[in-house]
Amino acid sequence: MARLDGRVAWVTGAGSGIGESAALKLAEEGAAVVLTGRRAAPLEDVAARIRAAGGTAEVQPADLMEKDAVRAVGAFIEARFGRCDILVNNAGLNITPRRWSVLSMEGADELIRGNLASAFYCVTVVLPMMRARRDGVLIHTASMAGRNVSPLSGPGYTAAKHGVVAMSHTINMEECVNGIRSCAVLPGEVATPILDRRPNPVGPEERARMVQAEDVGDLIRYVATLPPHVVLNEVWITPTHNRSYVAALGQKL
């Protein structure tokens, strides 16, 4: 029997990268998956692959920086399934003009809303459904930037991801009495489309040595299938050839 039969998972940022991989792997375990992202076409592609394998997938495009859009997806999940057992809070973004010398108010707003506010919105939607069943798992894609401070990710992204990590721990502090578990996943460099937004290009040879989206998807599946009496509070997943460590050694990347 698949380990997530009868469960419902909401995966945000599900059209590509980590979200796409997580959605496919949770569906392999039997979960009905609700796919959210800003663009419908990639979500439909992921949904088609899940359905072709015999799974259940629903497409709910939304801009998660908009509160009403998040509420609408939550209402759909409740009406369609009556429950949400797993939230993969994966949607996020970065921008190219990210350093203080070029960061604008509009850029700061986009970074905070796209990485932190949107994550809070999704949590507030699913917690009532989880409390009703006294069970549920929330998995948040943070970043090494959620623990470390460096110029690479930029101040807005770094601050927002620190907020995501703190948010996850506060959920465990308050909701452990309701059987709800929250995990912050902190990837190092992952070969996903977000790399295309970096000021300095990252070539294919470097990307091949990074963590791959499938690696993080496997980790998310593991967290989602842990028994209810166990919570993995926080976990790092980084490349063996960690470019930040290599740089600290004074060697070529």
Image: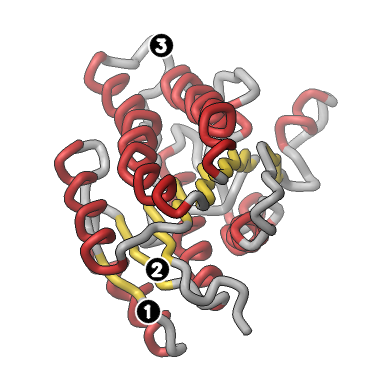
Seen in the picture, residue 235 relative to 101 is either above or below; the reply is below
User: How far apart, in angstroms, are the residues tagged by discs 3 and 2?
Assistant: 39 Å
Q: Residue furthest top?
A: 101
Q: Tell me residue 180's x, y (percent).
A: 54, 44
Does the CB distance between marks 1 and 2 fall below 8 Å? yes
Q: Residue at x 75, y 28 (%)?
A: 247
Report the residue marked by disc 1: 56
SS at mark 2?
A: strand
Quarter occupied by residue 34:
bottom left
Seen in the picture, residue 165 relative to 68 is either above or below; the reply is above
Q: Tell me residue 81's x, y (percent).
A: 31, 68
Report the residue marked by disc 3: 100
Residue 152 visible in the snapshot = yes
Of 175 and 73, which appears nearest the observer?
Answer: 175
Seen in the picture, residue 68 relative to 223 is either above or below; the reply is above
SS at mark 1?
A: loop
Q: Amino acid at mark 1?
A: Thr
Q: Tell me residue 169's x, y (percent).
A: 58, 29
Few, some or many C-alpha atoms within 10 Å of disc 2 (few <14, some 14-19, many ≥20)? Answer: many
Q: Tell me residue 238's x, y (percent).
A: 71, 44
- Screen quadrant of the N terminus: bottom right
Q: Is residue 65 left or right of residue 17?
A: left
